[in-house]
Amino acid sequence: MLTARRPRLTVLQPLLASALLLMALANPVQAHIGGALYPVYELTDSDLAQVCLRDGSVAEWEELLPGPSIVAAQFCADPTVGDGAQYDPTDLDFRVWLAWHGAAGRLYLAIERVDDVYINDYTSAGPGAIPGGMWAQDSVELLVDGDHSGGDFSGSANPNWTPDEQKLGAYRTAQAYLAVATAPGSHTVGYLGAGGAWVDWPPFTDAGGGHSGGSPDTSVIEFYVTPFDDLRWDNPEQSVPSQLYADKIIGFEINVPDWDVRGTYHGYYVLAGDAVTWRYAERFVDGRLLPAEPTAVPSTTWARIKAGLR
């Protein structure tokens, strides 16, 4: 049985958002895009024992965390992609929960999508498979810069690099993942760089989800990834995972595509609202790794929120 550890924020949710924004404005050097800090909530060991990635439900996230870290209305519609559809909750609505676990070095994401038309024909799965067609489904993309170092992480930074050097540099200092709600073999997450044969499998990455058909369709995607400061696709032993600890600032980006017709984007929703996040990590947004209660910013009094700003 789930046990709620943190109170739901209700009226405190806007106060938390304001507090995080003030933190960002007080320290602009740390801010990437938009000057906002998004909450990433800590999971304790007991919390983690209650998380099931394959139950097709966000019930545990609703119980364990104060509320979603981000909702659809906070995203920007990219007018250059497909139909450029603007946010319309009757067309697509979604909520995103972000969490972290320090000992495991994992960043968790759960998203619940309510979509008038659900498209998911993804069929590629198995050890060594690349995400391939995941991008063309109703899915979610997570990019993460665990040490907030920014820079070109695409492998194209130096035009003089050889193909092998480009392959080594791609997704080395920041990583990108795609995930879908369901897939054959239940392998519903894929790492976009080389090394997927080990990077996007446990203990580094795992995922699950489910959906209930109809119009609207409700789908759930849950997964964790391991951020790396230095990911060597050909050498797991030499790769350096990011250290996750309370109050650390990480860079990240979330993209949510909407397909109403196979092969044609209807809408494409981005959090950073800035171009070329696929290449430059400094164009990500910022997330603060909030510690578990009682020391976290989400508290029961405004006085404690103000204390967290000092």
Image (cartoon, rainbow, N blue to C red):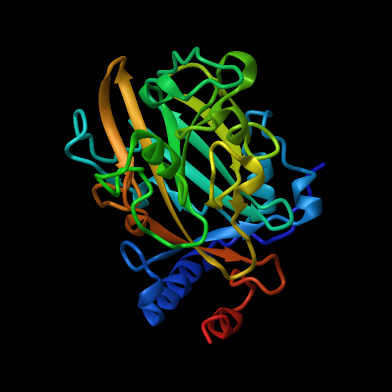
Q: Is residue 171 above or below residue 261?
A: below
Q: Quadrant of residue 117 in the image?
A: top left
Q: How many marks?
A: 0
Expressed as whole percent of the image width and height from the top left, the position of residue 243 reads 63, 60
Q: Give me the residue at 50% from left, 14% from top.
A: 124
Q: Give whichever of 70, 8 is nearer the camera.
A: 70
160 left or right of 116?
left
Q: Is residue 207 above or below residue 204?
A: above
Q: Is residue 231 above or below residue 123?
A: below
Q: Quadrant of residue 303 in the image?
A: bottom right
Q: Give me the residue at 55% from left, 48% from top.
A: 97
5 left or right of 248?
right
Asked whether residue 208 is in view, the answer is no
Expressed as whole percent of the image width and height from the top left, the position of residue 259 reads 33, 23
Q: Give whichever of 217, 110 is nearer the camera.
A: 110
166 left or right of 202?
left
Q: Quadrant of residue 94 in the image?
A: top left
Q: Give whichever of 30, 287 is nearer the camera.
A: 30
Q: Give me the residue at 26% from left, 45% from top.
A: 160
Q: Give whichever of 27, 60 is nearer the camera.
A: 27
Q: Is residue 84 above or below residue 41?
A: above
Locate the N terminus by quadrant.
Answer: top right
Expressed as whole percent of the image width and height from the top left, the position of residue 16 reads 50, 69
Asked whether residue 290 is in view, the answer is yes
